[in-house]
Image: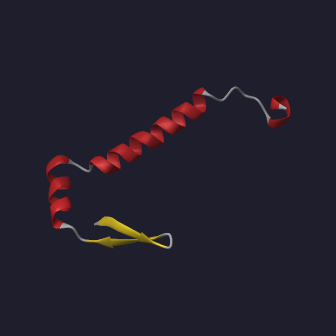
Amino acid sequence: MINTRHDAGRAETVDVPIYAGLVEERGDVLAEARRTAEQTLREAGKSLDFGLTAADAG
């Protein structure tokens, strides 16, 4: 299934055989990109954490 459009914050999903075939053939590139982006954000958050609290920053 793939998200096709958004209505008031709700995504409508439909079955798209071509997309399913591509996922089967090439892998789910979108899901992999999402996982990589989330991992990168976590690692960046750890790297940029200087241990300051809000009181120290002000």
Q: Quadrant of the C terminus?
A: top right
Quadrant of image for the N terminus: bottom left
For the point 14% across and 50% down, the residue is 25
Residue, x 81% and y 36% (percent of image)? 54
Q: Position of residue 45 (x, y in %)?
A: 59, 34
Identify the residue at horizontal 52%, vertical 32% (top origin): 43
Q: Relative to residue 56, is residue 10 depicted above or below?
A: below
Residue at horizontal 62 percent and vertical 28 percent from the top: 48
Q: Is residue 28 left or right of residue 51?
A: left
**Image height of 58 relative to 34, above or below:** above
Q: Position of residue 21 (x, y in %)?
A: 14, 58
Q: Is residue 5 left or right of residue 24?
A: right
Q: Quadrant of residue 24?
A: bottom left
Q: Is residue 1 above or below residue 57?
A: below
| Way the structure is coloured | secondary structure
Instruction: Tell me which corner region of the image, top left, top right, bottom left or bottom right, holds residue 6.
Output: bottom left
Name the residue nearer the viewer: 38 or 19: 19
Is 9 in front, or is 35? 9
Tell me which corner region of the image, top left, top right, bottom left or bottom right, holds residue 16.
bottom left
Q: Is residue 27 above or below residue 42?
A: below
